Every structure is written in C-alpha cells, then in structure tokens.
C-alpha cells in the first residue's frame, strides 16, 4: 500500500490515490459478492453487493477519465457566474454553442471535472428548496394538493439557485 | 479561486464579507460551513434532548411491573421515536455537523466544495426531522414499529394511521440530506485540500469522515429504496413485503440491514476520528501508526458492507456461518485501532483534561460494547439473546459508551475553537463522572436482564420474573444520566458567557484548525502554515521557536 505521497500534491499521482479509495471498495465488493452468492444463493444481498461494485467501478473509470491535475490557470479568479451560466457553458463546450469559445475568447470554465462553485455570501434558496421538499413530502402523506405549492416553490427556488451569481 | 492564490503566498486573505452577522436572516440564509456546522450541532443536541426525554419515560415505565405511565401503544411509539431520533437525527447529524465545521479547517480550505448544497442539506435534515416527529401530533400517534420498521408490522394492516407514513417520508428526506452531505464531504476532501496536504497527511478525523461519506453513499440509497417500496406497499397497493401476495418480508430485513449495519459504522467512525485527534494532543505524542489507522478505517468500512444479516440469524433464511465470520473479522481492524490508541498514550505526557477524560472513557465503554458484539456475532449465542435486553445493552455501550462519550469529548475539545471560550473544567469533570456512573448503572444491568430472558420492546414484565430490582437500578441510572446532561448544559451556558478566553490554540493542537483564530474568520484563515507532515501546526510551532516545540495544553487544570 502507498505510504505518504511526495510533497508534489495535486499532480497525477495524488489523484490516483483518491481513486484507489473507490477501487479498493469495488474489488472487495466483487470478491465478497461472489463468495456470498456461492455460499448462500441469496439474490437480494448478492445484487446489492454487485451493484455497489458496479457503481464504484463506474465512478473509478469516469473519474479516471475526467479528473485533471490542477494547473496554475485554475487558480486565477473567475468572474462571477451563476450555475446556469456554468451549465450552459458545459453544454456549449460539448455542442459548440458556446459563443465565448467560438469567438476565441478566454474560456471561463476551469478544466476540472470537480467544479469549485465559488462562495456565495448567503442564499435563501437552500432554505426555500428544503421548504418545497417539506411540502412535497407532506403531500405524500396528506394528499397531492400539497404538491401544487411544493412544486411551485421548488421550481422557483431551483431557478433562483441556478441564476444566483457566485464569485 | 482567488483565495487559494493569496493563501499560497502566505499573505493575509482579506475578509470579503464584512456585513454584520448574527441576525435571524443571516442564520437562515448562511452558506458558511461553520455556521451550518453550528446549526447542525445545536439541532442535533435538540433532538438528543427530546429523544432522551422519551427514554426517561421508557425507563420510568419499566421501573415496576404492570403499566403505570403509558399504555402499550404509547410505549411502542416512545421506543420507536427514541431510536429514530437518536440514530437519524442526533448521532449522524452530530457527525455531519462536526465534519462541516472541522473538515474544511483541517484541510486548509475556505469552505466546503458546495456551500449552498451544504445549506440545503441542513434544511432538508430539519424538514425530515419535523415530518418524522410530527407523527406525535396526528390522531393515530407517531410510528410504533421500532426504528427498524420490520415488515409486516409496518404494513397498513398492522400499522394504519399517518404516523408510519410520516416516519417513512421524514426519513426519506433526511436520507437524501445525508447523501448530499456525503457528496459534499467527498468533493471537499478530494478537491479542496491546501497545497501540501496530501491524502496521507490529512488528520485522521478527515479520513474517517471520508470513509463515513463513502458508507453513506453506499447504503442510504438502499434505505431510500426500501422506504419507497414500503410507501408503495402502504399507499399504492404494492406488495413487496406482503407474503399473501407473493412478497417477502425478509426482503425488508435484507434492505434495511444492508443500510442498517453500515449505519452503525457511520455512527461510530467519525467519533473514532475524534478520539484519534484528541489522544495524541493530550499525550504530547504523534499518533502511533497513522497509516495503520487509515487502513483499519478503510477495512472497517469495507467489511461493514458484508455483515448485514447478522441481525437476521434467527430468521433461518440467511447463511449464518458467512455472516458470523465477516462480523467477527471486524474486531481485527477495531483491535488495531485500540492498539494504536494505547500505543499513542504509551509513555506519553498525558494530561487528563476533560476532552482526554471523555476519550479514555470512550475506550473503556466502547470496548465493552465491542466485545459483546463479538459474542452476538456467534449465532448460537445470538439465538439465545436475540431481542433481549442483552442486545439493548450491547448497542447502548456502542452508541452511548462509544459515540456519545466521543461526542462530548469533541464538544469539550472543539467548542473553544467554535466559541473562543473554554468550557469549565470542574463542571466538565463532574459531567464526566456523573455520565460514566449513570451510564453503567443504566446499561450494565441490561446485560444480566437480557441473559435472564427479559425481552426488549415490551412495556410490561411479570412481577414474578425477578426483573424489578435491576430495572430500578437502571431507571435510577437514567436519572443520573439526565443530571449529567443537565450539568453539561449548565457548563455550556455558563462558559459561553463567562468562560476563560481560549486563544487560538488552547490545547497545543497539531492540525490546521488550531492555526487560525477562535472563532475562525469568514473563509477560515489569515495565514496557513506550510504543510509538510500530518502535524502542520506542531511543525510550525517548532520552526517558529514558539513556546517549545511541545507546546502543551494550557487550559484550566493543566500542569
């Protein structure tokens, strides 16, 4: 097993160490799931263990592909943007609708799979969204009429959340 | 991210948000991980007090044979909501609250990765708690199906009324909250460590929060699925768990315990982390076997995914030897941890201040709970004591003797950082001794009661059974526990008003949270010491030739 990594953090190796965290679990789940099947022939537990392995393995593969080491450009402050900006930015990157990139401008997207969101000073939308969840949840018990205010509040808080600018 | 840049150069980070803090609106809209951490801790203690009151009623009822205070239905509601409240709304949220406050500080980050998601996580937890406990306000009362909600007892036939539905929906919401919180912790730990803070230099507490988050990601979705199935059974006429229509009640137990056993580790691993933070600092030594601790935590996390059916030995529907073996093997990495804790203290310069006192109390009490766990992992013993007070004693030694002792250790250790004031040492020690005496008086007799055949979850027992003397002892112990918690609350309120100022680093700590002010400024650090080992603050003290490299606790009662 790897000992303390060298001081050069945030390089390729450091990322691998984080992925090993998941890889170990995936391997363990495959092994224990196989053993479990052959000692018990019990479907529910075997599926839970193997689904866990598949989910973890998928994460390892996906993260291995998309994690990039941090570069100095990532540390340059970005202009304030909103979640919606970033979503359309990602969309534009894949479907070439991104005006900024098309115009050859400086891309505002950091090349990181792990998007650092910036730090909004405060936001009412998390509370509003949780209130919407409360209404939707109570609607499951006391009747779907509660879903009308719940969905309205949920949709508006989602919109407010996505369009709020963060530094 | 502007802050990383300036932090790297070691210059001061200008506080970006200078508007006045502390109003109600500020608390409702905050996205600061520290404030959300405080909200989590305060709410969790609130649920602890409420669920604790429920348990006092349970103990009062059990002090004598017959029914004196509550009827059977109310009693069932009491123990159900006591368990639900303690597990879902106290212990896990306390871990998330401590993680919220201290993980970013310990890895040198300005906040968690997703601050608004973090706030949403907290408010969703509150929504879930309100819905779950609102069952008490409905005509049929709260859920009375045990915190495990076994089918077919939880079906419409045997548990009509809105209480169980509210319980399902509330726990669904709090489960989603847990999943989102886990994602946030993982993203924070993987993506926001300060340069130099490699994975193997992170404080053990962060490692344990990381593994806990992994377990939450694995198991909470299973619980959510199970609750969705139960909801469909109850409300939409499904029959996942209804044997008369081809469903399988045992499936509920598989799903529930596939969540439920890792949940036990979700409730203890963060507090293993807390104790591993405290013991080295109060022994004036580096932690013994850092990587051993990390791998033991990883092993416990991994093993815990494959032990679920040891709760189901007596169903006759599972492979008992498999689960006996996987359950017993967990004692090995736990033993590694105990060895390392003891080796850390060995020949150290131990100062028995309150956080250390609670940590040592934790070692002894959790050890008893762990050992009875090995007994229970043996199917022949489990057949004998299944669903008796022996099991109740076991998991209270794990969750109270383990988690709660470590939670109080964490409070005494970290509240000075959160508030800037030290807790009163004398009251803290009084709290500890009352707690450990009351705890053992309450729960040790339950081992004997269980071995003698007293069933759990039943409001009454026969006067001919001979159970009453030990039950009176347990009830008296519960009274002492209530007194102990009252002492803690008094200590807290008095210390917050008149406590001695803590300074930045009252204990001579090792990890980065001690490098900033108490309480930390917005976005946490004015200066972050360089990180070259797992004890950056210790190194920094040595390099700067401060009050001796050893530092040393300077809080009240030291020396």
Image (spheres, coloured by chain):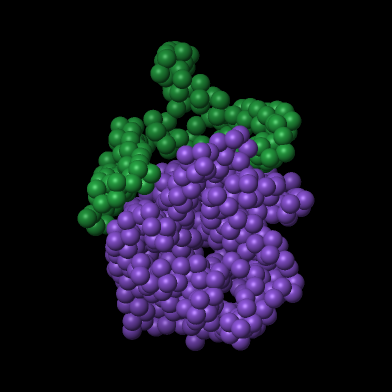
Chain colours: A green, B purple
B345 and B70: which is toward the camera = B70
Give residue B451's position: percent from left, percent from top. Answer: 47, 78
Q: Residue B519, can we see it?
A: no
Q: In the rendered view, would you say B474 is above or below B57?
A: below
Tell whether A129 sits left or right of A34.
right
Q: In the rendered view, would you say B92 is above or below B488?
A: above
Q: Looking at the rendering, which quadrant does residue A161 occupy? A: top right
Give residue A47's position: percent from left, percent from top. Answer: 35, 41
Tell whether B128 sits left or right of B547.
right
Tell whether B331 sits left or right of B514.
left
Q: Residue at x 67, y 60 (%)?
A: B77
A81 and A48: which is toward the camera = A48
Q: Residue furthest left?
A: A1
Q: Residue B310, can we see it?
A: yes
Give residue B534's position: percent from left, percent from top. Answer: 35, 62
B273 and A112: which is toward the camera = B273
Q: In the rendered view, would you say A18 is above or below B266?
A: above
Q: Residue at x 51, y 71 (%)?
A: B388
Q: Residue at x 64, y 82 (%)?
A: B463
Give residue B191's position: percent from left, percent from top. Answer: 41, 43
């Amino acid at each position: 097993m790897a000992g303390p990594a060298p001081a050069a953090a945030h390089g390729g190796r450091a990322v691998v160490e984080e992925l090993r965290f998941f890889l170990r679990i995936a391997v363990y789940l495959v092994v224990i799931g196989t053993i479990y099947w052959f000692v018990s022939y019990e479907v529910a537990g075997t599926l839970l263990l193997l689904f866990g392995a598949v989910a973890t393995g998928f994460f390892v593969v996906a993260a291995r592909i998309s994690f990039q080491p941090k570069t100095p450009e990532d540390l340059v402050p970005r202009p304030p943007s909103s979640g919606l900006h970033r979503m359309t930015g990602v969309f534009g990157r894949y479907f070439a609708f991104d005006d900024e990139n098309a115009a050859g401008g400086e891309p505002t997207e950091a090349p990181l799979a792990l998007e650092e969101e910036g730090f909004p000073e405060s936001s009412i939308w998390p509370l509003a969204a949780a209130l919407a969840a409360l209404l939707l949840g109570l609607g499951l018990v006391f009747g779907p009429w509660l879903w009308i205010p719940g969905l309205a509040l949920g949709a508006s808080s989602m919109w407010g959340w996505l369009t709020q600018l963060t530094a | 991210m502007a802050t990383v840049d300036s932090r790297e150069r070691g210059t001061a980070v200008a506080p970006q948000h200078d508007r006045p803090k502390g109003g109600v609106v500020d608390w409702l809209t905050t996205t600061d991980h520290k404030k959300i951490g405080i909200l989590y801790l305060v709410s969790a203690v609130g649920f602890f007090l409420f669920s604790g009151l429920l348990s006092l009623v349970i103990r009062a009822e059990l002090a004598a044979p017959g029914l004196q205070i509550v009827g059977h239905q109310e009693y069932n509601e009491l123990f159900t909501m006591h368990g639900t409240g303690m597990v879902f709304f106290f212990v896990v949220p306390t871990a998330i609250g401590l993680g919220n406050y201290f993980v970013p500080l310990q890895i040198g980050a300005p906040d968690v990765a997703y601050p608004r998601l973090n706030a949403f996580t907290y408010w969703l937890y509150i929504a879930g708690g309100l819905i779950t406990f609102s069952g008490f306000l409905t005509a049929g009362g709260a859920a009375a199906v045990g915190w495990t909600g076994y089918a077919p007892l939880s079906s419409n036939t045997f548990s009509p009324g809105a209480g169980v539905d509210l319980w399902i929906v509330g726990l669904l919401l709090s489960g989603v909250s847990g999943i989102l919180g886990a994602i946030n912790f993982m993203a924070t730990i993987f993506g926001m460590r300060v340069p130099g803070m490699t994975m193997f230099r992170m404080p053990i507490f962060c490692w344990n929060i990381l593994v806990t988050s992994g377990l939450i990601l694995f198991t909470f979705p299973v619980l959510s699925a199970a609750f969705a199935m139960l909801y469909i059974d109850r409300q939409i006429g499904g029959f996942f768990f209804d044997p008369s229509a081809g469903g399988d009640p045992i499936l509920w137990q598989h799903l529930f315990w596939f969540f439920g056993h890792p949940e036990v580790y979700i409730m203890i691993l963060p507090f293993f982390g807390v104790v591993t933070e405290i013991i080295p600092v109060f022994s004036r030594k580096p932690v013994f076997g850092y990587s051993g601790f990390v791998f033991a935590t990883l092993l416990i996390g991994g093993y815990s995914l494959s032990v679920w059916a040891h709760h189901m030995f007596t169903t006759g529907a599972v492979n008992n030897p498999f689960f006996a073996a996987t359950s017993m093997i967990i004692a090995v990495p736990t033993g590694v941890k105990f060895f390392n804790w003891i080796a850390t203290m060995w020949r150290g310069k131990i100062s028995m201040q309150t956080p250390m006192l609670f940590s040592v109390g934790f070692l002894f009490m959790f050890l008893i709970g762990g050992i009875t766990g090995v007994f229970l992992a043996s199917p022949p013993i489990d057949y004998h004591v299944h669903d008796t007070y022996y099991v109740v004693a076991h998991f209270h030694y794990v969750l109270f003797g383990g988690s709660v002792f470590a939670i109080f250790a964490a409070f005494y250790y970290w509240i000075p950082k959160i508030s800037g004031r030290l807790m009163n040492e004398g009251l803290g020690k009084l709290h500890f001794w009352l707690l450990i005496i009351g705890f053992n008086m309450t729960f040790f007799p339950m081992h004997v009661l269980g071995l003698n055949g007293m069933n759990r979850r039943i409001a009454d027992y026969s006067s001919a059974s001979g159970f009453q003397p030990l039950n009176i002892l347990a009830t008296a112990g519960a009274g002492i526990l209530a007194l102990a918690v009252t002492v803690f609350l008094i200590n807290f309120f008095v210390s917050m008003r008149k406590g001695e100022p803590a300074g930045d680093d009252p204990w001579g700590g090792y990890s980065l949270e001690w490098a900033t002010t108490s309480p930390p400024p917005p976005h946490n650090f004015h200066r972050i010491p360089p990180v070259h080992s797992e004890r950056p603050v210790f190194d920094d003290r040595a390099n700067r030739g401060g009050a001796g490299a050893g530092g040393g606790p300077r809080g009240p009662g030291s020396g």
